[in-house]
Image (cartoon, rainbow, N blue to C red):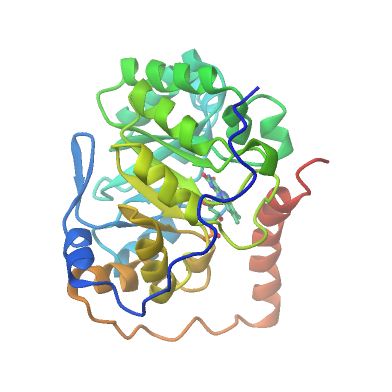
Amino acid sequence: MPTRQTERSPTEQSPREPSELGEADRQRLATPLTIGTVQVHSRVLQSPLSGVTDLVFRRLVRRYAPHSMMYTEMVHASGICSARKMEKVMDIDPDERPISIQLFDCRPDFMAEAALKAVAEGADTIDINMGCPVNKITRKGGGSSLLRQPQVAEAIVQAVLQAVDVPVTVKTRLGWDDNEINIVEFGQRLEAAGASMLTVHARTRAQGYHGPARWDWIRAVKAAVSIPVIANGDIDSVAAAIACLFQTGADGVMCSRGTLGYPFLVGEIDHYLQTGQRRRSPPPLKPLPAPLNTCVTSGITKANEACFKPANT
Ligand SMILES: Cc1cc2nc3c(=O)[nH]c(=O)nc-3n(C[C@H](O)[C@H](O)[C@H](O)COP(=O)(O)O)c2cc1C
């Protein structure tokens, strides 16, 4: 069983939120993000979003955020090993850099083999999904269920590291539920296993995608590890990014649902961190005509439904 730390968040009250970052913080965040051997000239990342962050979507986001790290949708390692998902992984532009391929599975040997193939396809880093809450995945020991099996999580990181010469990163959550918030210890173990960066979605698996992200836990993780920590959850505006970076001291932020319908978000936050100025972006996309809109939203709804299913069903 994972270590039960505390049911309460590490800080009782969040510090007052500023409307601007202090100059020292902004200057720190205008410097490149170092992920192991890879330098990324932006501290704003576009998250992996299953069913969304395909080549076309990433291209759109990158138009406004040319230096940001983008992630593929999560890919099942055994799919890559058996070549069934190769086509999807290969869907990376040769000039699409920096790019991370996100893999999931709970078998270290499969993950190592898949990582090798992903690097051959052009991945600059391999990200391991240890946060997906979907039952279909957690039941088989993948995604967020790895938070309950830290020794397997470590073995995966070590096996992938042995197989490839690119940095290995992990995206995870606070813990399984409020009784099992173990992100601080989990993060330390992953760092010791060799992970080069940790992205923390500041919700538990039981929360799914509901309720406000609990950024104060990210501050606790940041204080406990030396590798870069990226804050994720509710980064949906420049103001949210400022508040989050101020509260957590994180090394960067990762945008997720905030980019849906607003592909300028990553670029807007990046521009603020680089210059201290807010950039005027085009207004959010106008709704599509009804038939097209139904088509697109039903696709996204299907992806969301899979994720939003109550955690213990
Ligand atoms: C439709 C959808 C698909 C997602 N797919 C992935 C995925 O493939 N890999 C992953 O690590 N997280 C995935 N996530 C989680 C997001 O990357 C992110 O951690 C989460 O949405 C919290 O950020 P937000 O509150 O800003 O949306 C997905 C979320 C949604 C809503």
Q: Does the image show residue 123?
A: no
Kindly give the residue lying farthest to the front in the view shown.
Answer: 12
Instruction: Please tell me whether residue 178 is drawn above or below residue 145 in the rendered image.
Output: below
Residue 230, how many percent across, how many down?
38, 50
Q: Residue at x 53, y 23 (%)?
A: 150
Which quarter of the image is occupied by the N terminus?
A: top right
233 or 62: nearer the viewer: 233
Q: Does residue 42 appear anywhere in the picture?
A: yes
Q: Left or right: 177 with respect to 276?
A: right
Q: Residue at x 50, y 67 (%)?
A: 258
User: Is residue 54 toward the left or the right of residue 142 in the image?
Assistant: left
Asked if 153 appears above or below 239 in the picture, the reply is above
Taking depth in this image into account, of 261 and 1 the one nearest to the observer is: 1
Q: Residue furthest toward the right?
A: 313
Check the picture and name the quadrant holding the C terminus.
Answer: top right
Counting every numbered tag in the picture gives 0
Q: Is residue 102 left or right of residue 205?
A: left
Work out whether 149 lies above or below 40: above
Of residues 221 and 147, the one nearer the viewer is: 221
Image position, residue 172 (x, y; %): 51, 40
Occupied quadrant, residue 12: bottom right
Residue 44 point in image, percent of width and height = 33, 59
Query: Measured from the top left, where is residue 294 in percent x and y?
Result: 71, 71
